[in-house]
Image (cartoon, helix red, strand yellow):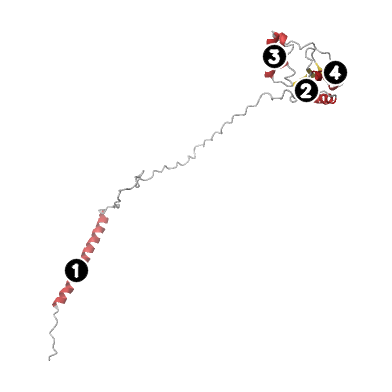
Amino acid sequence: MSNDQPPRQAGPVRRRLLSVTGAGLVVLAVGSLVLWHAQLGELFGLAADKEPVVSTVNAPALAVPPDTPATVTPTPFPDPTRTPRKTPKPTRTPAKTPSQPVYDEESINGLSPTLKSRLRKAMAAAQRDGVTLRITSGRRSAAKQQRLLNDAIKRYGSYKAATRWVLPPKYSAHVQGKAVDIGPAAAMQWLNRNGYRYGICRRYDNEPWHFEAMTTPGKKCPPREPYARPVPD
């Protein structure tokens, strides 16, 4: 038996090698061409930026388009040459205060210091005698005095007759806090008898309730007047 073998055929193997090599060269050439085309497009601005296409189906409506830039108002710089304006302060309305304090007419409040002090001592002494001195009218407002005068004019028929009982505000001792009307009748009588001890006197014959500080405590009261002196209209 012979060991000689027939020689291998090199033709098919060589062809396959050439085919593989050729395919590789083609792929390399195509890739180089694509890369070159992309670089050429970037160089000449042929490749435009494209945004991805987003589907708007069932998408919520936007009040402002997403690509709309926000408007920003620039903050002006202060002018160093201009004097800044001062912000005006709010004007406060001053609280209204009464021109004359309001007093309880049936108390010693509002009376002059002299009459108040003397009346306190007289009240204490009368209380020890079992008599209560009650103030029926002390310090009056000018408006109240004017109303009393108007009523007196209607009652007595004339200004002259009315002023014998009620003086105008600018002449009234009540408006000045220098007179008191006392009640009841027992208190009037007690103070008429004992008032001089404390410097308090009845002033008019026609008003047994009207008392003023008219003398030095302990001294006799001056003679009473028949009524208030009429004053010019």
Query: x and y percent of residue 132 in the render?
Result: 80, 23
Disc 1 on helix, strand or loop? helix
| Residues packed near mark 3 inside 10 Å, few (<14), some (14 to 19) or many (20 plus) | many
- Gap between marks 3 and 4, in whole Å? 30 Å
Answer with mark 4 or mark 1, whichever residue precedes in sequence: 1
Q: What residue is drawn where x is 22% and y is 62%? A: 33
- Return the residue at label 2: 134
- Gap between marks 2 and 4, in whole Å? 16 Å
- Gap between marks 4 and 1, in whole Å? 151 Å
Dot label at residue 128: none
Q: Nearer the viewer, residue 221 or 122?
A: 122
Disc number lying in front (3 or 1) = 3
Q: Quadrant of the N terminus?
A: bottom left
Disc 4 on helix, strand or loop? helix
- Return the residue at label 3: 149
Disc 3 on helix, strand or loop? helix
223 to 6, vertically: above or below: above
Q: Amino acid at mark 1?
A: Ala
Q: Amino acid at mark 4?
A: Arg
- Return the residue at label 4: 193
Q: Amino acid at mark 2?
A: Arg
Q: Is residue 94 left or right of residue 159?
A: left
Query: x and y percent of residue 156 in the render?
Result: 71, 9
231 to 118, vertically: above or below: above
Q: What residue is drawn where x is 18% and y is 69%? A: 22
